[in-house]
Image: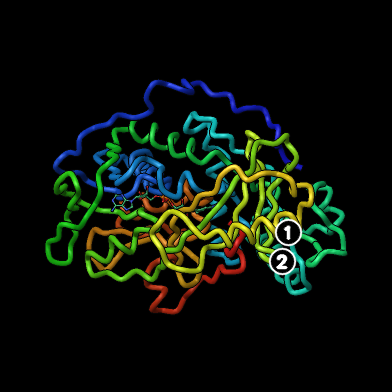
Amino acid sequence: MADVDAEPVQLTGQQHPDWLWRTPDPKRSYDVIVVGAGGHGLATAYYLAKNHGITNVAVLEKGWLAGGNMARNTTIIRSNYLWDESAAIYEHALKLWEGLPEELDYDFLFSQRGVLNLAHTLQDVRDSMRRVHANRLNGVDSEWLTPAEVQKACPILNISPDVRYPVLGATWQPRAGIAKHDHVAWAFARRADELGVDLIQGCEVTGFLRDGDAVVGVETSRGPIRAGKVALAAAGHSSVLADTLGLRLPVQSHPLQALVSELLEPVHPTVVMSNHVHVYVSQAHKGELVMGAGVDAYNSYGQRGSVHVIEAQMAAAVELFPIFARAHVLRTWGGIVDVSPDASPIVGGTPFENLYVNCGWGTGGFKATPAVGWVMAHTIATGEPHPLNAPFGLERFTTGALIDEHGAAAVAH
Ligand SMILES: Cc1cc2nc3c(=O)[nH]c(=O)nc-3n(C[C@H](O)[C@H](O)[C@H](O)COP(=O)(O)OP(=O)(O)OC[C@H]3O[C@@H](n4cnc5c(N)ncnc54)[C@H](O)[C@@H]3O)c2cc1C
């Protein structure tokens, strides 16, 4: 099994400098404005500068850097999605993750400890095996494990046949894992800043400057700023922003909650997910059990959710891990995720000239952070989608070429 206790990455840079980026005032114009300083916006800015030499870039953030979903997610990274298009973009991300600590010179605790996706019914088993085969055809590491093998990978998991939904096996992706999300954001931010990108916090985009059907800048809480190109990376608020242009994005915003336990000794060596009993659990480096489930069913922009959802996910967790029964919850929180009809992202151009959108990542966009930055930067720089995001354009909702990842996306982030 993979490396929970792997050697720390040897880095050359200073790990905790006094400041990681400048705090510039916004200029009157930029070549590119990225809206939203979550992981996606920061990675987009970094790759615009690094891969394309475009450095006259601002990332505008209404709150604080990584104050949105980026530092609220449960940090699961994997690439075992069903369809070819998804496997390609998530696997590109995973390959980038594998080199990112060295590239960004920041040890954000990327730990490839493997992910188990449990199967509890015969249909689960069939669907899971289909996914294993599809993954392998796409070069994604994926195996089918029997209940005994599952328990070897995660000894504290209850594989008794006497429970409501016994574990009948699991898919296993050894290269999957977790990373410390806020540090990932800081790592991208520091490098983007060094390359000349302006990271501007406390600057809300309230509308767009237009010249006919072309977007030529943004209105902000700190005045208008002109731009050659504008990219939206605002996650749960994407549709609100697009609305100001009369552009209706096919996404719905939902609260998604997570929780952590008090700090415990290391007991949980991997990541376990169950779509069926509806919970997933890993253990953070500092000892907290990190748990999550599916979205709260209603639409909302409040970064909080309902208690009954937390109750249900804890009940499911105790069913799978009786050992957790006496652990205490330390805190719960919520983020606002933007869910598309086929549970796949929307990444590409819009009907407006010079306006690009990256949204619809729903419950699973953290793992894609480097790849989406990479392909968004390409799309903005060249005006054409990268082959990896070409299938994820807005057009698919009119052509019908949907990429239905509900099975792989659902609760399993
Ligand atoms: C509880 C929870 C658990 C999750 N678990 C996982 C997981 O385990 N694995 C996984 O892959 N994904 C997970 N996700 C999903 C993942 O976090 C998101 O898909 C991803 O973070 C979205 O991209 P982002 O980081 O750029 O978004 P965000 O960090 O939300 O960035 C968007 C930014 O835009 C800013 N913004 C919004 N409107 C404006 C405006 N008008 N002007 C300026 N700025 C604006 C926001 O303040 C925010 O900072 C989870 C999400 C949540 C909430």
What residue is pinned by disc 2?
128
| 168 is higher (above) or lower (below) than 192 | below
Residue 302: percent from left, percent from top: 40, 57
Q: Which mark is residue 171?
A: 1
What colour scheme was applied to this rendering of the protein?
Answer: rainbow
Residue type of the residue flagged with mark 2: Ser
Q: Residue at x 32, y 44 (%)?
A: 63
Q: Residues within 10 Å of mark 2 (few under 14, many from 20)?
A: many
Query: Is residue 346 something one can see in this rendering?
Result: no
| 12 is higher (above) or lower (below) than 65 | above
Residue type of the residue flagged with mark 1: Thr
Residue 112: percent from left, percent from top: 65, 42
> How many tags in the picture?
2
Badges 2 and 1: C-beta atoms under 8 Å apart? yes
Q: Residues within 10 Å of mark 1 (few under 14, many from 20)?
A: many
Horizontal relation, residue 354 to residue 40: left or right: left
Q: Quadrant of the N terminus?
A: top right
At mark 2, the secondary structure is helix
Does the closest atom of ligand 1 sit within 8 Å of the Cβ of label 2?
A: no
At mark 1, the secondary structure is strand
Residue 325: percent from left, percent from top: 75, 49
Q: Residue furthest left?
A: 211
Give the camera-side residue of 26 and 79.
Answer: 26
Q: Quadrant of the C terminus?
A: bottom right
Q: Residue at x 37, y 38 (%)?
A: 50
Residue 30 lies in quadrant? top left
Does the closest atom of ligand 1 sit within 8 Å of the Cβ of label 1?
A: no
Q: Which mark is residue 184?
A: none
Give the camera-side residue of 245 and 156.
Answer: 156
| 391 is higher (above) or lower (below) than 280 | below
Q: Residue at x 45, y 59 (%)?
A: 337
Tell me which label, 2 or 1, sits earlier in the chain. 2
